[in-house]
Image (spheres, rainbow, N blue to C red):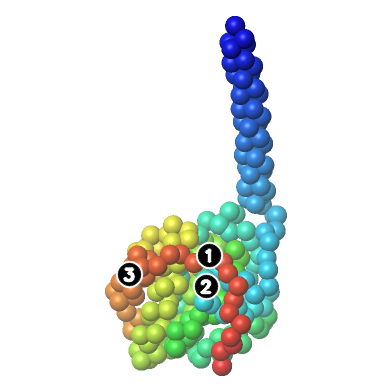
Amino acid sequence: MEAKDADRRIGRRALLVGGAVAATGTAVLARDELARLWWRTPGVEKPREAGVVDYAGARWVSASDANWRRADRPDDYGIDMVVVHVTQGSFSSAVKAFQDPGHRAAAHYIVGQDGHVTQMIRELDVAFHAGNREYNERSVGIEHEGFVDRPQDFTAAMYAASARLTAAICGRYGIPLDREHIIGHVEVPGTDHTDPGPHWDWDRYLRLVRRAATSRPTPSPSVSPSASRA
């Protein structure tokens, strides 16, 4: 009889402990859900730290605040597209333009002919790069140093670096690796731009993007390297 009473007491304690654990687990889940909902609440600013980039290996250089709009993407605007641009100038001239508040345009990234990647606007935010508000809100813009009529400007280093960047962006937001979702500026409705132009090798580029997507993990936001680029 005493053994049975002991078993009952042990059983009751187990139920009480189990209930407490379950209650704690429910509280943790509720807290996590509230945190998730807070993160997705429109108008609530997400934590931002100086020098943090969205693509590991990129260097951070801020664009003028006049050339982009603060947002909470992909919560308020889903990201389903990458837009490929060409700077029609040097790397330094593109940076200067994007830092000029009177320019009224800037892309998230610039890829140099030497393969260096510079980020000027967070992917969270809407960059004024496509000349079409809807496309701005749903895309990440990547500029490439050079001119559309100079095929020699599109170097192997540039193609490779840009492909790795695009693969990381597409992996982060679940963007299909095809020409419907990786497009040129020329394909944006309502604009008169022609970039990246007839010399941009789309077959080569998409092949490199797909190869990069299968060969490396998607980088998460990280601190920008301190090394500067001339």
Describe residue 92's horizontal placement relative to residue 168 as left or right.
Answer: right
The reply to whether callout 3 and callout 1 are in contact (CB within 8 Å) is no
Residues packed near mark 2 inside 10 Å, few (<14), some (14 to 19) or many (20 plus): some
Q: Which is more N-terminal, label 2 or label 3?
A: 2
The residue at 65%/75% (across/down) is 51
Question: In which quarter of the view is residue 26 placed?
Answer: top right
The residue at 65%/67% (across/down) is 69
Describe residue 125's horizontal placement relative to residue 186 as left or right.
Answer: right
Residues packed near mark 1 inside 10 Å, few (<14), some (14 to 19) or many (20 plus): few
Answer above or below: position of 167 versus 8: below
Would you name the residue on which mark 2 appears? Answer: 56
Residue, far top: 1
The reply to whether callout 1 and callout 2 are in contact (CB within 8 Å) is yes
Amino acid type of disc 3? Answer: Arg
Question: In which quarter of the view is residue 197 placed?
Answer: bottom left
Real-space Cα distance between discs 3 and 1?
19 Å
How many marks overall?
A: 3
Circle 2: element type: loop
Which one is in front, 167 or 225?
225
Q: Residue 199, position in %: x, y?
A: 33, 84
Q: Which mark is residue 211?
A: 3
Residue, far right: 44
Answer above or below: position of 147 versus 33: below
Q: Which is more N-terminal, label 1 or label 3?
A: 3
Circle 3: element type: helix
Would you name the residue on which mark 1 appears? Answer: 220
